[in-house]
Amino acid sequence: MSGGPADRVGDTAPAAAPTDSEATEPTEPTERTEPSGGRPMTREDAGTAGSARRGRSLRWVITPAVLLLLVLLVRTFVVTPFGIPSASMEDTLEIGDRILVTRLTAPGDLQRGDIVVFDASRAFDLDVPARGLFGSIVAGAESFFGRGQPTDYVKRVIGLPGDRVRCCAGDGRLEVNGRPVDEPYLKPGQDPSLTTFDVTLPADRFWVMGDNRGDSADSRAHLGDPGSGMLPGEDIIGRVWVRYWPLDRLGSPDRGQ
């Protein structure tokens, strides 16, 4: 016979039995590895992972806060929503309409026929309701969703600073600087005014009236008050930009002439 057992292909010599010094207990690994079998995770890696988790948690808090801040800034300085609570501007604006008011139009840029929202407390000599802390918080939340303050009014600009506004011309129309004014925005069936007046507006004062003249407590109703019904420009919150609700009346209210 040729060859011994050691000559067969693939056979190897039997391994030597371990000595007492080699047969030791397995030792614990000194480094943990990722479950995916990647490189060993060091203490620095564990700290980085913890920081990443904390960063994700902070983002869940910071992101909504930043978005809320942006909304508040836009609402305060750019555009503000308001709801229409009365019939004084019918049929142009009806009860329940929602409007956006742009704050980017300076009083000096307003034109006759513009519709504005303003704080009427000085012009119309209104009492400003006192509020505690809770009342102020509630009012702020309501205004965020478009509910104005009790002294916030919406009217149409009829006279600009320096104008003479009179009621009425021989044909019953208002006169501005001696010229009769066409008012296509008036509620059908309404007269331009049943109250006679003749005023000359000082600098930075505006004359405002509602389109529903028979149901509008506007500049005419406050001729005898300290402000004589004349609106200071600095009390104008903004110009009505667009009606966004209801959807079937979406668009810019008619500016008139």
Image (spheres, rainbow, N blue to C red):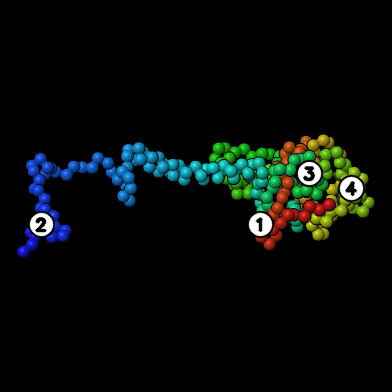
Q: CA distance from mark 3 to mark 2?
A: 108 Å
Residue 81 position in % (x across, y down) = 65, 49
Amino acid type assigned to the residue bearing label 4 in the image? Glu
Which label's residue is closer to the chain start, 4 or 2? 2
Where is mark 4, residue-wise?
A: 175
Binning the other alpha carbons within 10 Å of mark 2 as few (below 14), some (14 to 19) or many (20 upward) gives few
Q: CA distance from mark 1 to mark 4?
A: 34 Å
Judge by depth and name the residue closer to the eye, 131 or 155. Answer: 155
Q: CA distance from mark 1 to mark 3?
A: 24 Å
Which label's residue is closer to the chain start, 3 or 2? 2
Amino acid type assigned to the residue bearing label 1 in the image? Trp
Residue 13 versus residue 54 in the image, above or below: below
Binning the other alpha carbons within 10 Å of mark 1 as few (below 14), some (14 to 19) or many (20 upward) gives some
Which label's residue is closer to the chain start, 2 or 1? 2
Where is mark 2, residue-wise?
A: 6
Q: CA distance from mark 3 to mark 4?
A: 19 Å
Judge by depth and name the residue closer to the eye, 9 or 111. Answer: 9
Where is mark 3, residue-wise?
A: 110
**Label 3: which secondary element:** loop
The quarter of the picture where residue 73 lies is top right
Residue 63 is left or right of residue 93, and the answer is left
Where is mark 1, residue-wise?
A: 245
